[in-house]
Image (spheres, rainbow, N blue to C red):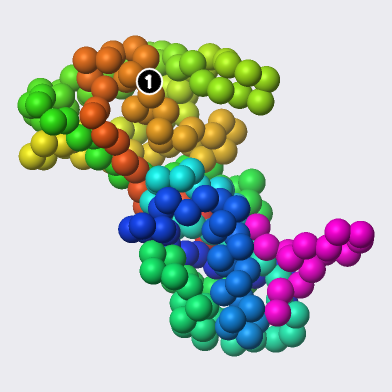
Amino acid sequence: MDKLRLRFEKTGRAVYISHLDLMRTLQRAFSRAGLELKYSEGYNPHPLISIVLPLSVGTGSVCEIMDFRLKGEEDLDMLPERLNRALPEGIRVTEVYEQTRKSVELKWLEIEGFFEYDSREAGEMARALERFFAREEIRVQRKTKRGMGETDIQPAVRSLAFQPEEGQVRLRGVISAQEPTLNPELLAEALRQNAPELAPDFAKFTRLETYDSQMQVYR
């Protein structure tokens, strides 16, 4: 079966599983579920399985997308249950279907985040965060393949909103998934570099949904 796609969640303690370990975990789950993956040809064959947008360690998601190919025909409606029986806590397949859209069509990510503040007042922080992220330009130093580089993250932000809660500020927003890719961790890093008085004591993020360039849900 060619061009299949599944959506899965990575939550709880599973957010600390690295990308490579996640790939191994998923491959073992297919094997334990009695599902035979197709392999590439050549001297070093590997299973035809790939995650569209690899997730950073520590970031959760309820909308991860993985493409794969199987040998033989299978009932796609039954695959989530079969795979979930073989997966560890925190990793759960929610849907399996035939792939109809190319990965390059995925453009936006809806995210939720929490900025925790041990001693600063959440309402005051939320208002200050709104002002900071309303700047026309937000430059951040970050590591690249060529070393350290500087980038303006503002063009990769479609929307951000901040809601104060007890001891923390809840963030909801839409950021660029590809071209350019914005890791939500850079939102906290931008504060550390440009406004340390607003930097959270702890930050965590979760992907909520994927969209195309027209803000239609991407599958």
Q: Is residue 43 magenta?
A: yes
**Looking at this view, is 119 or 3 the one in front?**
119
Q: Is residue 30 visible?
A: yes
Q: Is residue 170 left or right of residue 48?
A: left
Magenta stretch?
36-50
The picture quadrant where one finds residue 143 is: top right
Q: Quadrant of residue 127?
A: top left
Q: Is residue 127 above or below residue 206?
A: above
In the visual, does 152 lie left or right of 104?
A: left
Q: Is residue 144 left or right of residue 10?
A: right
The residue at which mark 1 appears reads as 190
Of residue 127 and residue 18, the one placed in the foreground of this image is 18
Q: Amino acid at mark 1?
A: Ala
Give the residue displayed 54% in from the left and 34% down from the top: 181
| Vertical order, 89 against 74 (above or below) | above
Q: Nearer the viewer, residue 36 or 177?
A: 36
Kindly give the residue lying farthest to the right in the view shown. 43
Instruction: Provide residue 135's location: percent of width, then percent of height.
Output: 33, 15
Residue 195 at what x, y percent from top left?
28, 13
Quadrant of the image for the N terminus? Answer: bottom right
| 159 shown above or below 79 | above
Q: Secondary structure at mark 1?
A: helix
For mark 1, does the 10 Å Cα neighbourhood hold few (<14), some (14 to 19), or many (20 or more) residues?
many
Query: Where residue 35 appears, x then y in whole percent?
Result: 65, 81
